[in-house]
Structure formats: structure tokens, C-alpha cells
Image (cartoon, coloured by chain):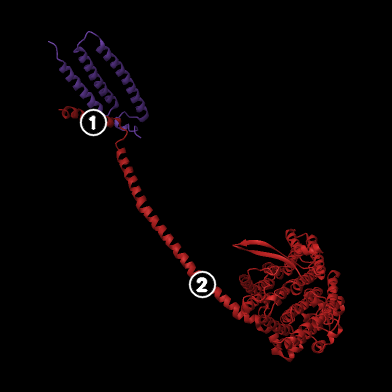
Chain colours: A purple, B red
Amino acid sequence: MTTPLAHYLILAALLFGVGLAGALARRNAILVLLGLELMLNAANLNFIAFWRFSSHPGELTGLMFVLFSIAIGAAEAAIGLALVIAIHRHRRTAQVDRFDSLKG
Amino acid sequence: MEFIVKHIWLIPAAPLLAAGAGALLPKRRRRSGAGLAVGAVGVSFLLSCAAFWATLHGGRATSHFRWFDFGATSAQLGWMLDPLGAIMAVMVALVSLLIFIYSLGYMAGDGNFTRFFCFMSLFAAAMLGMVLANSLLLFFICWELVGLASYLLIGFWFQKPAAAAAARKAFITTRIGDLGFLVGMLALYSKTGTLLFYDGGGGCLEQGVIGGVAVSTAIALLIFCGAIGKSGQLPLHVWLPDAMEGPTPVSALIHAATMVAAGVFLVARVYPLMTPQALQVVTWVGALTAVFAAAIAVAQNDIKRILAYSTVSQLGYMMMGLGAGGVAVGMFHLTTHAFFKALLFLGAGSVIHGCHDEQDIRKMGGLRKRMPVTFAAYAAGMMALCGVPLFFSGFWSKDAILGAADHWSASRGPFYLGLFGAFLTAFYMTRQVCAVFFGKPATGEAERARESAPVMTAPLLILAVLAVAAGFFGTPAWPWFQRYLEGGRAGFDLSRLLDGRALTVMLLSTALVAAGITWGGWIYGRAGRGTDPFEKARPALFACLRRKFFVDEFYAATVVRLTAAFAMFCDWLDRVVLDGAVRAVSWLAVALARLNRSVDESVVNGGFDAGTEAVRGSGAWVSRFQNGQAQRYLRVIGLAFCGLLILLLWGSP
């Protein structure tokens, strides 16, 4: 008995919602980044689920796609953490609401 | 001879060129300026002599050319050669030449030597052009040039306020007469259609009575107005004595050869226009002027002013001669007077120079021994002016006038006035000569007086000879001058001299002259210094004469005051009415401009400002959304995404 597709999708949506909430509500920059990672992984879960339930699951297209996505996510996390460290050095804080120089 | 008859215009052209060239010379080129002027007038004199010689042999010429066209007609100018013009040209050129040479000495110390000779040349050129003009228009042009030159020369020492005022007075007073002249000229033109004197029968002098006796008389009298102004006749004589403010050679030139002679010459030139009625006016004006001015001369103390009033008086005689006797009588006196009056003025200049610019005869005296040459020449001039019988020119020319007045049918008045004037002339000249040359020197200046340089005394001697000799050309026994002007020949006939009536006049005038000289000599020869003996005897009369019959005061109280009042009225009109209108217009313009500005500022600018303010406000409000917090941007995006999602889920059925 296999689990239907809808369950995966619901799980991914919940995971995305948790990530989004973290990204929007958290003050700490590192926790915002964690939220972003959760949202990325929710998308990855969707990719895998749609691949498994597609018409030709024997080809490894979905798997490859997700591998690329994880690699890009890792790179993105590295850049994000580097930015956070640079800002922290400069400003002596990691609170996102204190970062207000991104305006004209 | 043919040459000069054809090219008569060369006579005035020479000094005119000298004046033009002299005007361009730098101030320091004194020798060239003076040489040019003397040379040019010398050339004029030689050419005039040639022209005169030609007229002796019947040479006559008239020429004319078109100056400019207006409408269907044109202004014609022209030159003419006739005995009247030729004798005047010779006289003017000769007297001018002698005065120019004299000026070399008299003006030697003046800084504006070159300018002086430039003006003098212009004066001579204008006068020569006038006597040779064949057109009343050209005559008028030269006439005005004479006026201009006299203005420049009387005001030559314009640093002196009196000289500047005298120049203005001369110019304005003569201009009053010139207005009449101009109107007369226009009237003449409108009646005859030409201003040429002689034009083969078509000239304005050849047409007889013009448009009836009344019109003709009116034109003649209007033209005579010009002569009254220029020749210093009765109502307009006031400028002439004031003109003494100019340098003495200028006075000599004005009084002898040029300016005042112009008026007499004008009457002589347009004599054919003069109706008997007009001639009556001329005679009376002349006779009254003769006595009036002679009486004033009795009480003057300035050596040149005495001579000036004497000139006015003698000009009156000339007008009387023209009116009563004809062209020849007046012109003869004009010619002899030119010589002896030039002599007297140059002599007076020599005296003034010798006494270091002293002009008051009360401060002279005893100069007979210190300035013998001047004295001899001056005495000759004085006797010629008085009319001492037989050997002096003034006797013959004055006698001709008195004889003509004696024969005048209209009235005996001018004859008696003339006789009285002759007596006064002898009296005031004796007074002057006694005060200047006899007695003891009154001041140290007079005591130290020295004879003038030969360049000044030589012209005096030449003029003295002429003042004596000129009379013999017009005696009743040999009336060469009169016949020459009429174009005939004179024979010598002693019997005319002994004609009963003429002899009576001659003896009468001789007796009066003798009485005048004797009485004058008796009073002033013995008088010491101090109050004038005549003043002691008749103080009221003397004061009246001293103040020149109050003519200047009368003019100051009437004409000048009237003019000043009118000027004040015009000033008021200008300031209050015209300026007021202008100010009202300008005020209106300013008010409109202010209104315009306020509309511009409040309405146009206000609307614009409000618009921009709204844009700025909304911009400020909108810019609050960009607060720099990336998280908040993300929230907005999230909300928008949710909104979009809801719209997609429920919006599409």
C-alpha cells in the first residue's frame, strides 16, 4: 500500500509554511536563514514527490534536479552566513530589524 | 579782365578756403594761420581790383545756377558783377586786408591767434559773397554767415561773461530783424517766383512794382527790417555798442567794412523794390537814429563805445541818404565812413594797447606826445568823421546826404535832424580827442604809454590817407562816384560847387561843425580831471544820455520780461501739464505691471506651487514604505502572494 501524492504535498506545504513563518517572524538573521532552508527543502520534497508519481519514474531526472537544488541551497547558505558574519562584524548585531540601510 | 568777369566767385572763395584751412590748422601754427588769412584776403583784394577795373570799362555780368529743385520750381543762386558790388568788394577787401595786417600786431599776445584769423577770414568771405550775390537767397545765406561770424568774433573772448552775453545779444537782436527779412523774401518769392536779382528781364528787381503799391511797400519794409537789425537802426541798435566786448580789430571790421555795412548794402541792392512810401520810412528811421545815437555818444566814457554810437549815428545818415537821395548818396557815405571808421577803431585799438588795455577815456590824456603817429592818424579820422570842410572825406559824403535831405520833398524834418546830428558829432568827437590826447596823463598807465609797433601804425597811415582822399571822388564838382554807380562818366565842373542852394547847405553844416568843435574844445580843452563839465551843468540830461535813454532798461522791463514770463509759462506747462500727463501714463503702466505681477505670483505660481507640494507630500508618504528592512519587504511580498493566491482560488469560478 503506497502513500498517495497528496500526503507528500500537504507535508511539503506545511514545511514551507513553517519555513516562511520563521523567515518572516524571526529577528535573528541565522534563524531567518534556517527558515529559508526549510522552504527550500519543502520545494525539494515536492520535486521528489512529483518525480516519483510521474509517468516515467525510471529516469533519474527528478533526483538530479533535487541534487542541483541542494547544491545551490548549500552555496546560498554559505553566502548568507558570510553576509551575516560580515554585517555582525560591522554592526555588532545580528538582529534583522536593525539592518535598515537597504533604502534610497 | 574777361577771366575775372566770368569767375567773380573766386573773390569770396579765397578767404572762405582760408577759413576752412585755418580751421584745420593746429593751434600752434600761428604763422601759417595768419599768413593764410592775410594772403587770401590779399588775393581777394587784387581780384576785386581787377573786377573793379573791368566795370570801369563797362564790364557787367550776371550768372546763375540751380541749387536744388523743389516741386516744379528750383532754388537759384548766382553771382553778379556791377559797379555797386565791385566798389563794395574793393572797399571790403581793402579794409579787411588792412585790419588783418593790423591784427597781426594787436592779437600777437593771444593764445587763439589761429582761430581768430579763421573767423576773420570767414567774416570777410561772407561779406564778399554777399556783395557779389545775384540772388536774394545767396545774399541771405551770406548775410546769416556774417551774423554767425560776428557772433563768433564778438564772443571771441568768451571767458569774459560780458563778451559771451554781448555775442548772444548781437546774434539774437539781429535775428529779430532777420525774421522780417526772411518773411519779406518769402513774400517776394511768392509774388515774383524768383529770387534772382537780374535774370535778363526776369529777375525780381526788374519787374517794377510788384502786386500793387501796398504789397510792394510791405515787402520792401520787411526786407528793411533785416537792415534795421544788421545796421543797428533805431529799435534794434542795442547790440552794436555791446559788441565792443570783442577784440578791437573785430570792432573795426564790424563797424567799417562788414556787418553794419551789410544792412545799408541790402537797401542799396534791392533799391528797385523800394517804393516812395518805403523810402520815407527808411529816411525817418535813419534821421532819428542819427541824432539819437549821436546824443548818447556825448555822455559815454568808453573810447570804443563812443565810436560805436558814432557808427550807429553814421549808419543813420547812410539810411537817410539812401532814403532821401538814392543809392549813390548812401553808398558814398558808406565807403568814406568805412575808411575813417576803420581808422578810428584801429587808432582806438592802438591807444588801448598803448595804455595796457585801458578803455576809459577819463583815465587817459596827454597821449599826443607819447603816441604821435596814432594821434596824427586819429586826428585825420576824427576830422573826417566830423566833416571838417574841403579836405576830409566825411565832409563831402555827409554834405551829399544833407543836400539830398534838403531837396527831399516829403518833409524838412530829416534835414534839421541831420544838421543837429552833425553838430553833436563834432562835439562828442572833440570831447573824446581832448580827453584822450590832450591835457595831462590821468594815470600812470597813460604816462607810460608807448607808440605801437609799425605793423599796427602802417595800416593806420594808409587808412588816414584813404580817409582824406576818398572824399575827392564824390564832390559835387567831380561826382565820379555817383556817375560810376549809374554807369556814366563824370566831368569836372567847379560851378556845381557854387550852386546857391548847395553852397548854403555846405556853409550851414560847416558852421555847425565849427561850432561843435569850438564849443567842445572850449569845454573839454580847459577842463581838469574830475566830473564831466557837461554833467555839472545838466546832471539830469547827462544821466539820461549816459544810460542811453534807458533803451536797454526799457527792453529789459518789457520784451525781456515778457519773454521770460512766457518762458516761465512754458516751463510751467512743461513741468505740470505735460510732465503730469507723462507721469500719469507711467503711473498707469506701473500699476498695470504690479497687477500683472500679483496675478502671476498668486494665481499662476500659487497653483504650480500647490501642485508640486502635493507631489512632494505624496512622495514623502510613499517613501516611508522603503524603510531599509528587507524582512518587512518580504512580509509585503508574502501578503501579496497570499492575496494573489486567494484571488486565484476564489476569483476564478
Relative to residue B137, is residue B650 depicted above or below? above
Q: Nearer the viewer, residue A71 or B399?
A: B399
Disc 1 marks a residue whose amino acid type is Ala
Q: Quadrant of the C terminus of chain B?
A: top left
Residue topped by disc 2:
B572
Q: At which x and y percent is residue B118?
A: 74, 64
Label 2: state its secondary structure.
helix
Q: Nearer the viewer, residue B591 or B394?
A: B394
Q: At which x and y percent is residue B345?
A: 78, 75
- The image quadrant that residue B366 belongs to is bottom right
Label 1: state its secondary structure.
helix
Chain that bears disc 1: B
Alpha-carbon neighbours of circle 2 within 10 Å: few (<14), some, or many (≥20)? Answer: few
Nearer to us: label 1 or label 2: 2
Using the numbered discs, state the Cα–Cα distance from disc 1 to disc 2 in whole angstroms. Answer: 87 Å
Judged left or right of residue A60, residue B130 is right
In the rendered structure, find residue B640 and report the number of the disc placed on it. Answer: 1
Disc 2 marks a residue whose amino acid type is Trp
Q: Quadrant of the N terminus of chain B?
A: bottom right
